[in-house]
Amino acid sequence: MFLRSRAGLRRTALVAALSVGLLTPLAGVAAAGPGKPGTGKSVAAAAGLRSYLVLTAPNNTSGAKSAVSSNGGTVYASYDAIGVIVAHSTAADFASKMRSVSGVQQVGASRTSDVPAASSNPAIPASPSQTTPTANETSRVDMTQIGADKAWEVTTGSSNVLVGVIDTGVDDQHYDLKANFDASKSVSCAYGKVDARTGAWRPVGDHGTHVAGTIAAAKNGKGMVGVAPSVRVASIRVAEPTTQLFFPENVVCGFMYAGDNGFAVTNNSYWTDPWWANCPNNVDQAAIMEAVKRAADYATGKGVLNVVAAGNENTDLDNKSTDTLSPDDSTPSSRPVTASCKIVPGELESSLTVGSITSSNAKSSFSNFANKVNVAAPGDNVYSTMPGGNYGQMSGTSMATPHVAGVAALIKSVTPSATVDQIKAKIAEQADDLACGSDSRCKGTTAKNTFYGEGRVDALAAVQGGTPPQPNGPWENTDDVQIADNGAAATSTVTIDGRTGNAPAATKIDVNIVHTYVGDLELNLIAPDGTSYPLRRANPGDGSANLTTQFTVDLSSEVANGGWKLSVRDTATYDTGYINSWKVSF
């Protein structure tokens, strides 16, 4: 669920919907801590169908899967690498029977409500109708506060860095997001398994689009600009429609997907439903804690830094006493909790946990605090993208977290070899110290305390000393060059500069040639040192007209910088044409 305050839903965020000029508190939107938006009501489903997490040793799920079927359940999804099975059953004794199965370590109900009927055939969210922004980008206080505007003089990020927004979905067609959005890496994990259909990642709420803009809104002169405006961003939607709840099987799916698909950073501005805090002495909550921990650790082991919101309850997480928010998918009630009861993923050891500060560098009124808080970032009245080409303000640790995810992406851009631990260390080392002040709840020193962790994240300091990412092109020549009929080769030159070292082993050469008989054409790529790389031999039997295609060439033995030539020779008579354009990209 979105981060929200005790006064409302855990993601209780104040949203200024600028398209209508209102400042409106939206229930369930991330405003003051990890939480989620929505009603907290479940969708009608098959009567009594419940979801369970069945845990085994990693890569040892086969026996448990068989037992699921024999004990009145079905396997909905399985994450064998971490020993987590998502099972559905209507049998009241399913969990107790499964706990006695050999090899099964833990079993826990992942909800206190029925599984929505939509889980068997999820609908694809509609693509919002779009408005094109007219307002120019401005120097916003949150970006100047963390030095992002100065960091852009070092780097705006690399397109080789992929950041996942694990959230309510992202509007991929938004004017400020579409240039950096990677649809090929975007999915839905709603209900607990990957749905890679086109558009499944789209928003079922505003929250994820707002987060995505803070991370990677393009620096294009309009609207707003994100912390890392040249990195790629992908949507991993874990929120379910209507309720917008983030159930544990969905979160497990999200982390596993990120780990297996080349993400460098994930942003996690939520706590896992239906329990605000999961207690180890409760069999259901213990299974939830362990399953989410395994998935987050799996992603970390694959090189993914999980940046997570601390939450919006203005609570000392090291001294929890009462939970009034859970279970949020049925009827919440007040219950005692202790420090051993953990908010996940915010209190997981592998997470980089973020608190929120105001524009005057004070703890935001809603921000949780604890020894687990690693750093702080602006979270009050943050202006960012909203679905449909709109923009608005939201407040919460949900809004602070993407600032840090963006800085992590910039570090990965200037130091591609940086590991998760190295990025975390760099963020901590370069953070600006913030003192506790007069608030006695804050424990620690100016250098590190429970309100601000290591301090306010510093984008400029974090990227200084790194190597700016090298340009990947494309480098293009669009001048028309006539091709002589059965004559000397025509050449067109593209000059590459700004690179160091050799060209990649998978360099892309795109050609667009207008010609009446392409079978006559012989194509070669000439390197700056004169080495010739054959691209295409003449094929007299090919009578088609015009050639628009891409070649992949191993140029790893060639220095990248210099003048590259496309050579095109017509090997027969009677047909004419010209090089329309061609380009090189890495």
Image: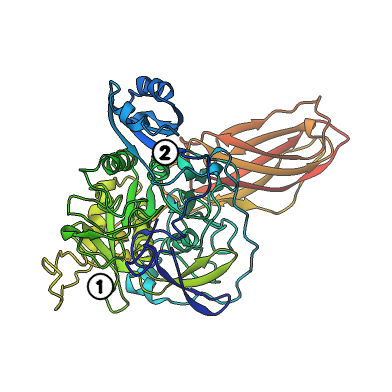
Local SS, label 1: loop
Q: Give the residue at x 47% y 39%.
A: 504
In depth, the one of 475 and 178 nearer the eye is 178
Residue 20's spot in the image, x, y percent?
A: 58, 77
Left or right side of 503 for 80: left
Camera sees residue 514: yes
- Residue in view at x 33 percent, y 54 percent: 307
Q: Residue at x 58, y 75 (%)?
A: 19
* Residue under label 2: 51
Q: Nearer the viewer, mark 2 or mark 1?
A: 2
Labelled disc at residue 251:
none
Expressed as whole percent of the image width and height from the top left, the position of residue 529 reads: 52, 40
Residue 352 coordinates in the image, percent (x, y): 27, 54
* Upstream in sequence: badge 2 or badge 1: 2
Task: Looking at this view, name the residue that lies furthest to the right.
Answer: 574
Q: Amino acid at mark 2?
A: Ser
Residue at the spot of label 1 = 363
- Figure quadrant of residue 261: top left
Rendered position, 523 above or below 329:
above
**Percent x, y of residue 581:** 69, 49
